Amino acid sequence: MDSASSNPSSDVKLVNGANGAVLEDVPHVTDWLPDLPTYANPLKHNPAYVAVKQYFVDEDAMVAKDIVVTLKTPGEGIHFRRAGPREQIYFKADEVRACIVTCGGLCPGLNTVIREIVCGLWTQYGVRDILGIEAGYKGFYSRNTRPLNPKVVNDIHKRGGTILGTSRGGSDINKIVSSIVDRGINQVYIIGGDGTQKGVNAIYEEIRKRGVKVAVAGIPKTIDNDIAVIDKSFGFDSAVEEAQRAIDAAHTEAESAENGVGLVKLMGRYTGYIAMYATLASRDVDCCLIPEVPFYLEGKGGLYSFVEKRLRENGHLVLVVAEGAGQELMAQSFKETGGLDASGNKLLMDVGQWLCSKLKDHFTEKKEIINLKYIDPTYMIRAIRSNASDNVYCTLLAHSAIHGAMAGYTGFTVGPVNNRHAYIPIHRVTEKQRHVNITDRMWARLLSSTNQPDFLKYDKVMDAKRKKEAASTPAESPPASIGTVGGEHTATPENGIPRGVGLSGVTENLG
Ligand SMILES: Nc1ncnc2c1ncn2[C@@H]1O[C@H](COP(=O)(O)OP(=O)(O)OP(=O)(O)O)[C@@H](O)[C@H]1O
Ligand SMILES: O=P(O)(O)OC[C@H]1O[C@](O)(CO)[C@@H](O)[C@@H]1O
Ligand SMILES: [Mg+2]
């Protein structure tokens, strides 16, 4: 690294290295407390780690954000600080009072992350004062803390959910930081999704403003896999595996009935990752509907004609729908939208139930019989315990987080970037949600495996439908949410995703 510069407009810490490499660094407690003493990392004498070659991470080791390069531009671009233990640390074991909190929805692996933070702090750094904050952010100021030690957390990784409880809403940053300071907590481990990570940033900023020595680490969690930059969120694999059971059941039911239709609704508020991966893994799915690809029912290329064709050809079919799909279409039918949850997330209308009744009505009108079985395993896929690979992943996340906090890094989120764990500036994971990129190879693989319609004529079809409706009803301005005139997007659709986001959204790392 030859020069350091900070970007005052965005507070992003940028360090310029050789060959156009840029380190996008995370904050450190010495940014506002420059004279803090350092200590030798006790791992140096830990019998389990002493034999590990190059166990300590070099101070200037970085992880490239993009690893596909050209001969002309190797090494250029954004990098993040590599996660892992540092030779020098900024906390002595007996000085640390750590706390752990889980926020947002459930996800397989939450208990594993809690367990491994506790056991990692205890066995690797000798920390003995670890507190659990109950019921999410609001627990900082509405509940007593719970002491945690390896005995208490010993077998919690075998259970779904979170032993600490979780919640949405109630993140009063001033009250949270006052509670942290009043309780003498100096390491805060926060596990949660995009909303939670925004809270991590706000807590870090308030702590910095108050000038206290507290490290705040975010561990990204979401069943939807919608967190940008990181390769994949923990629990996602477990959820996809569980979803297979629902798809298998839908397939068995559909196959065994005359004109059998199995419909499975899976989680995915703004993104269809679970639906896409479950479909690709299963190979029994005929059509997968996701929020990134608005679909339509009637006419050529629509869902009805596809279902009719598949029933004619195969006698049965399986549909998978992500819960955030079709929200715009439903809003047009119902002329209303859902409300908001306590965190301000949009409450979705039930696309599964709606599709069921639409399909039944359509075939009744055609005087044809279908045998439709609807399976909604929504909460079942996220309430399970994590599988083996997620357990290992959760352990690495927890360890990366504690190494970072012990080394004095703060206001960061941790996660694998191109298969190497890194300390990622929080704005990177909160400014953009990750979406299925529908011009990427993965979606093409799905289309080629299901041979489903691509629904690319959505705008044209909906425009024609609106014109037809307008001609048959007295003049009335269309609802703002509909949002397209002559193919141009004029407002945000009801699913909250700018239409076509999959075309230019966060790109896949998945080849
Ligand atoms: N901008 C923000 N600033 C501070 N806190 C926030 C912000 N957005 C959300 N939060 C808080 O973060 C917590 C979790 O948020 P949310 O319910 O959106 O879940 P999440 O972390 O996004 O996880 P998931 O969506 O995967 O369930 C809530 O307590 C919420 O109040
Ligand atoms: O019903 P809850 O717990 O608020 O959460 C539902 C939402 O949470 C998620 O599982 C994300 O955590 C979404 O897939 C889903 O829409
Ligand atoms: Mg969220």
Image: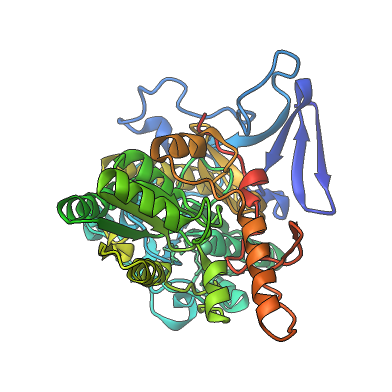
| Residue at the (67%, 67%) spot, across then down | 206
Q: Is residue 23 or residue 45 the one in the foreground?
A: 23
Q: Position of residue 357 (x, y in %)?
A: 36, 72
Quadrant in which the N terminus is drawn:
top right
| Furthest residue in direction left, as rendered | 256
| Furthest residue in direction top, as rendered | 71
Q: Quadrant of residue 503?
A: top right
Residue 343 visible (yes or no): no
| Residue at the (28%, 46%) spot, across then down | 241
Residue 20 placement, left or right of 258: right
Q: Quadrant of residue 460?
A: bottom right
| Furthest residue in direction bottom, as rendered | 474
Q: How is the image coloured?
A: rainbow
Q: Is residue 484 or residue 370 the one in the foreground?
A: 370
Q: Position of residue 195 (x, y in %)?
A: 56, 64
Q: Is residue 113 above or below residue 55?
A: below
Q: Position of residue 121 (x, y in %)?
A: 38, 49
Q: Quadrant of residue 381?
A: bottom left
| Residue at the (72%, 50%) spot, across then down | 31
| Residue at the (78%, 25%) spot, across then down | 20
Residue 453 visible (yes or no): yes
Q: Is residue 182 above or below residue 302?
A: below
Q: Position of residue 472 (x, y in %)?
A: 66, 80
Q: Is residue 211 or residue 335 the one in the foreground?
A: 335
Residue 88 placement, left or right of 388: right
Q: Is residue 268 above or below residue 30?
A: below
Q: Is residue 209 or residue 305 the one in the foreground?
A: 305
Residue 160 placement, left or right of 210: left
